[in-house]
Amino acid sequence: AEAVPFYGAHQAGIATPAQDRLAFGAFDITSRDKTAVQTMLARWAAAAAQLTRGEPVGAVDISPHAPPIDTGEAVGLPASQLTITVGFGPTLFDDRFGLSRYRPAALADIPPLPGDTLDPNRSGGDLCVQACANDPQVAFHVIRNFARLARGTAVLRWSQLGFGRTSSTSTSQDTPRNLMGFKDGTNNIKAEDTRSFDEFVWVGAETDQDWMRGGSYLVARRIRMLIENWDTDFLLDQEQVFGRFKTSGAPLTGKSESDTVNLAAKDGEGKPVIDLNAHIRLAAPATNGGQKLLRRGYSYTDGIDPQTGLLDAGLFFIVFQKDPRTQFVPIQRRLGGHDLLNEYIRHTGSGLFAVPPGLAEAGDYFGKALF
Ligand code: HEM
């Protein structure tokens, strides 16, 4: 399973098993020419089809007197389960390109949320490209070559590398650990659960924009962990923050990772076993009107914070959903206000993107219905 099919009803990189590495890029369009944007999206689509097969975007040795068409660093590397997922930010639908009538209501700007410490230079973007692969060079190669193909039309606004998946998206995958040392992804939506995908992830007949049917909405949050503080916290408190045991991943009301969480359980003194502000209580569907999210995030590190000398590392959180207004936004509003985890994290970047459905065949391109 080296190559993941690029064409299909949905874009790959959502329901397909989470790979180990991420390169994510948010782009700003610099051109005012709608046709240039259309051409770029078509070039990206053709390139994505090649790259996900493990091929370069063009010849490296085209001519001794011309720059190679592909930058070359992935030559000889296998497809590495590469997936390339493209999305459209709210700003793509402003007045510049006459696309405002295509803006889905669900692509409403994320309102300010409690605890936000967002850096505008790590937030927003007209377009996003999520490249996931099992080889970091294969993933980075995509962002680099997409930026090159975009030259004159769009520029990178911000980018993020992720070095390890923090979710499992299939029952066949082990649950990985995040940088806090906890198993992450236990109660995630799994690809085998197609009913939950239809109910919570894929845009369906409810949309006001037919071009989004079969697509999804991506929310990205760069969440820095205050690692040094976390590492001084005692084990029992760490476990109470999440509501799970650190080593086994079991809920505090159970023995093994897959045990059902019992939010009602009380201890001998009548206190809830899982704290009222524990992460898994506040995030659970049971306390959020039944809403679920597909989590597909990655651990990141960007070296050292020059102001403090502390590690700049954490979780590049990515979620897919049918409608952020009823999923990410209200859940994060609760978490941002009350989660015990807040003592140890800061949200430092944010992005929202409408991810159109999959491409049908060669010649099809991202957002074709908009042009
Ligand atoms: C569950 C970690 C941020 C939504 C969990 C679990 C861990 C975890 C360890 C328990 C295992 C599991 O079921 O996956 C973290 C860390 C975060 C973070 C370290 C930040 C650095 C968020 C955010 C959201 C979120 C921002 C949504 C806005 C959820 C959900 C669950 C969950 C929905 C499943 C709850 C359940 O149904 O049991 N998270 N998380 N998490 N998290 Fe987070």
Image (cartoon, helix red, strand yellow):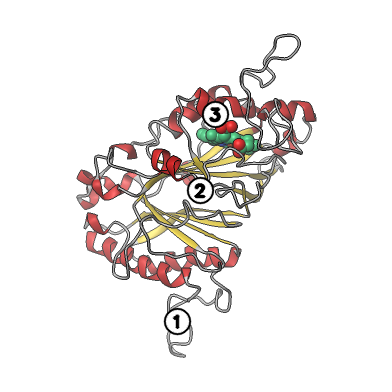
**Closer mark to the observer between disc 3 and disc 2:** 2
Any part of residue 151 in sight: no
Label placed on residue 67: 1
370 over 68 or under it: above or below: above
Quarter of the displayed picture in which ligand 1 can be seen: top right
In front here: 190 or 310? 190
Quick one: label 3 or label 1, which is nearer the N terminus? Answer: 1
> Ligand 1 closer than 8 Å to the CB at disc 3?
yes
Q: Residue furthest top?
A: 269
Label placed on residue 284: 3
Asked whether disc 3 touches disc 2, contact meaning CB atoms under 8 Å apart, the reply is no
Residue at image mark 2 = 192
157 over 74 or under it: above or below: above
The image quadrant that residue 107 belongs to is top left
Separation (CA) of disc 3 from disc 2: 20 Å
Q: Amino acid at mark 3?
A: Ala
Residue depicted at 48% across the width and 76% down the height:
55
Quick one: label 1 or label 2, which is nearer the N terminus? Answer: 1
Any part of residue 326 in sight: yes
